[in-house]
Image (cartoon, rainbow, N blue to C red):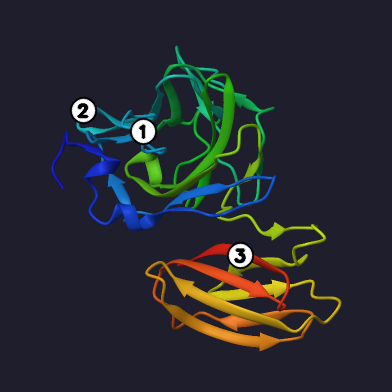
Amino acid sequence: MKNSIQRKLSSYSGLAASIIAIAGNAHGQIIYADPQDIILTPGENYYMDFDQNGEWDFFFEMATYAGNSGGITINNNNSNSFVAEPCCVCFYGYSISALPLNADICGGNLNGSIGANFLCYPMSYSCVDEWSGLNDRYVGFGHETNNNWQFGWIRLSVGPQCNILTIKDWAYNSVPGACISTGQTEVSTTIPDADILSLVIYSANRSLLVKNNYDHHHLQIDIWNTSGGLEHTIQTAAISEAIDLSHFAAGIYLVSVNDGSRGVNQRIFVE
């Protein structure tokens, strides 16, 4: 890897296959990206265009001092904010919080300013550095478009003394004002309409789950690929049905469930 390179999301081959839109309900629609890990060392930086609109949203910068890491900052573009606390020792920006898995991001705890916000600083200022040496922590963010806020997360790992940054994946809820939890990549769907089966359909751990068939309807479950090919079909009257997807190639699939007179469709993503 060469120093001082600027890498944009759009330059990654195969990225189109890693960005998915999961069909959701009134509570949200999650847009998730899982590219190859983006690894930065001192002197390198990365522009992130997380919503693929052709403009960068976040600028990750690995600063240097005497050839060593001088800290990690994330710069905002437009009206983005972070889950962060005021920085007690730095002269600008905020100290971005290292969130655990399943932390809610809803807007009430967003701070941060246009310009640099500290992620990690290689000194013993606990109010600046929550990140050194930690793996799989999350940046929570808000993104404003036309006075509407969308909330999301970015998963990172940081080396000791802020000497390496790994950007792993990210997601945001495309429905304005709808919350998201760190690590959340999909929305399960419950449709309580009299003309549509009231089922919960989602994928997890390379399995498809179809639940809440409390009336034991005789269901036909079909799984289709994006080319229109039928990958799997099964009939069941069980309250809950789990279908093994371990042999499926990674990608987006359409699940169609019906009882002969009513039906529901749901898109899923197999990792």
Contact, mark 3 vs mark 2 (Cβ under 8 Å): no
Q: Between residue 208 and residue 206, name the one nearer to us.
A: 208
Query: Where 235 falls versus 41 (above or below)?
Result: below
Q: Amino acid at mark 1?
A: Asn
Quadrant into which the C terminus falls: bottom left
Q: What residue sits 66% from the left and 40% below the top?
A: 179
Residue that mark 1 sits on: 53
* Callout in the foreground (2, 1): 1
Amino acid, disc 2: Ala
Q: Going by the image, does 171 lie left or right of 16?
A: right
Identify the residue at the far front of this view. 261
Residue at 25 percent across and 36 percent down: it is 42
Observer-nearest residue: 201 or 227? 227
Q: Residues within 10 Å of mark 3 (few under 14, many from 20)?
A: some
Task: Measuring from the top left, give residue 59's x and y in whole percent.
Answer: 34, 29
In the rendered image, which residue does mark 3 sit on? 265
Count residues near mark 1 (Cα–Cα under 10 Å), then give few for <14, some for 14-19, many for 20+. Answer: few
- Please name whichever residue, 163 or 105, is drawn nearer the observer in this view of the structure: 105
Nearer to us: label 1 or label 3? 3
Calculate the distance from the C-alpha at mark 3 to the C-alpha at mark 2: 57 Å
Circle 2 sits on which residue? 66
Residue 149 on image: x %, y %: 58, 27
> Where on the picture, by quarter, is residue 217?
bottom right
Above-or-below relation of 40 to 22 = above
**For the residue labelled by badge 2, is the local secondary structure a helix, a strand or a loop?**
loop
Q: Amino acid at mark 3?
A: Asn
Image label count = 3
